[in-house]
Amino acid sequence: MSTSFIVFYPFDATTALLGFGKLQNVEITYVSYELAIVRSKDQIHTPSTDLLSYLFDSPYSEHNQWPSDEPLFLSPPGSKYPSYTFEQIKKLVTCFASGLDRLGSKGKRVAIYGDSNVHFQIVLLGALGAGASVNMCPTCPVQDLAFRIQQLEADFVFFSSDEIDKAYAAAADSNIPKERLFSIDHSTETREAQGNDPSWSSIFNFKDGLSFQWKRLSDEESKNTTALYVYTSGSTGIPKLAARSHYGLIGNTEQLLFCYNGSNRGKGSVFCSFKAAGIGGILFGLLTPLKARYKSMFIGQCNVETYVGLVESFRPTYLSMPKYMVQELVDHAPQADFSSVTEITVGGAMVPFSLREMWSQVHGSPCYVVMGLTEVGIQISSNPLRPVSDNTLGQLLPNIEAMVVDRSGLPVQRNQCGELWTKDPFRMKGYLNNPAQTAEMFTSDGWLRTGDICKVNERDDWYFIGRIKDWFNINGNHVSASEIESALLKHSSIIDASVIPVKVPGDEESVPRGFLIKEQSSELTLEELYEWMDKALAPKIQLLGGAEFLDVLPLSNTGNGKPDRQALKKRAAKDLQASLGSLPHQSSKKCFKMD
């Protein structure tokens, strides 16, 4: 008599062979069951040191360097702010670090607030050299600024010169003494703070500051010392401050440069439109170009016309931007001269392949996408050497493990949807003063729960489906907000969409509500939109919480370039009751969840 076993491999084939090897009359049947568990095909070495030594001691590559007299930090033409060569940058950072160190900054926290300019980068790097940790905070209402200063427990506050009144008011609410407040203006000439004009330039130690040596961190110190506190998106509540170590940010930079330099490149010129306060702006606008010795332009907020003018004068080779800007430049600047651009990188939201194709058709360069989290940096990116024809995000960056799991935390098969969990040596240390939510992010064996619904195919191509908290049950079918957004963009009059969960009377579960941007010349009505959805889209693609047309989508003020979902939820809560009469009817109504 023989005994039969079915062994699923490669998951437990080895264990089965060891366990059954001594048995007699055993019949084993092997069944392929490829699980959604992926390890990066590339493993790279990451220096364990402080961020400033990493950036300034040597370039990423000795090839294709700009001449030493060419500026790398650029301000827009006609700006009152200067541009700086590499040696000038290093001098300013060192002398600023020396001066701030004299004020007792070691181990302190520095807040940098306002609409960014080139000098924000000098303050950030100089503060790190002085032994402080830094948070970049974008423009926001005074009450929000006061809260964020208190949340950071800031010791010093630097701010753009046009925000002095707001900074003073917020600092007063936070008990920050005036002598710890400094305006970041266009001058670096040393002068004493006078009245309500406490200039950052008063901190520079040009007399003997060049002899200052910032602390070079050991391997352990590099991994345990916080360099930056970076705001999370705040899409599900109050934004948290993710503590990113020197080592973690160095690793993020190495990952991106490894991917970007996978093909031969000349001298680089970078124009990053992610806000400087977000992880995208920090990585794509500052750290990667400085390490690679590329040129990088620093501007504040600007409209499409100004942006196009800057691209045409600056002639960058590489653009990085949030999704909404891609849509605007395709729709409103089709004649712009972007011939210098060899590629763009887009993140911050789901970017459908149709939009990427449209960019390439209109502006001539390939459009690549990235996905990541503030807590870990960029984890998935398009591969320039691997053409795509669908909505794939790309492959894992080096040194990352990832898997897709079901609700019980077990890995699913390839091409099945589940939550993305990752292991990354460059992940955050934790959330500032928030051990409970830090613990919720990680499993006991070190996996980070991203909260993203994804799937991966046999070629290790990753696909983003949606966020767990934006997952709807429509007539027994699960559908994500991003799926609905992508479907809505198929309508010829819809150019952008954001879908959020809302509660409507009579239903216990959240249902999707859409905020839509339509073509300026479009006369599309909501009723016409609902009729089109009934006829053209799958039954599960519905806006059961209604819809509203907006002129623009509000953007998060945490710096990530994403729609401000909290603002949209507040707007929906305020307007939903009055708009119940305009909710989808008839065939749409049958899609309410039924037991």
Image (cartoon, rainbow, N blue to C red):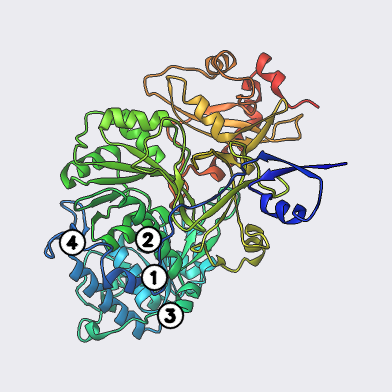
Element at label 3: loop
Q: Residue at x 31, y 64 (%)?
A: 121
Element at label 1: loop
Which label's residue is closer to the chain start, 3 or 2? 3
Which residue in the protein does label 4 denote?
A: 82
Q: CA distance from mark 1 to mark 4?
A: 32 Å
Q: CA distance from mark 1 to mark 2?
A: 9 Å
Q: Quadrant of residue 321?
A: top left
Query: For mark 3, does the 10 Å Cα neighbourhood hold few (<14), some (14 to 19), or many (20 or more) residues?
Result: few
Report the mark closest to the observer, 4 or 2.
2
Q: Amino acid at mark 1?
A: Pro
Which residue in the protein does label 1 denote?
A: 47
Q: CA distance from mark 4 to mark 2?
A: 29 Å
Would you say the residues marked 3 and 2 are in contact, meaning their CB atoms lie under 8 Å apart?
Answer: no
Which label's residue is closer to the chain start, 4 or 2? 4
Would you say the residues marked 1 and 2 are in contact, meaning their CB atoms lie under 8 Å apart?
Answer: yes
Q: CA distance from mark 3 to mark 1?
A: 10 Å
Q: CA distance from mark 3 to mark 4?
A: 35 Å
Which residue in the protein does label 2 denote?
A: 254
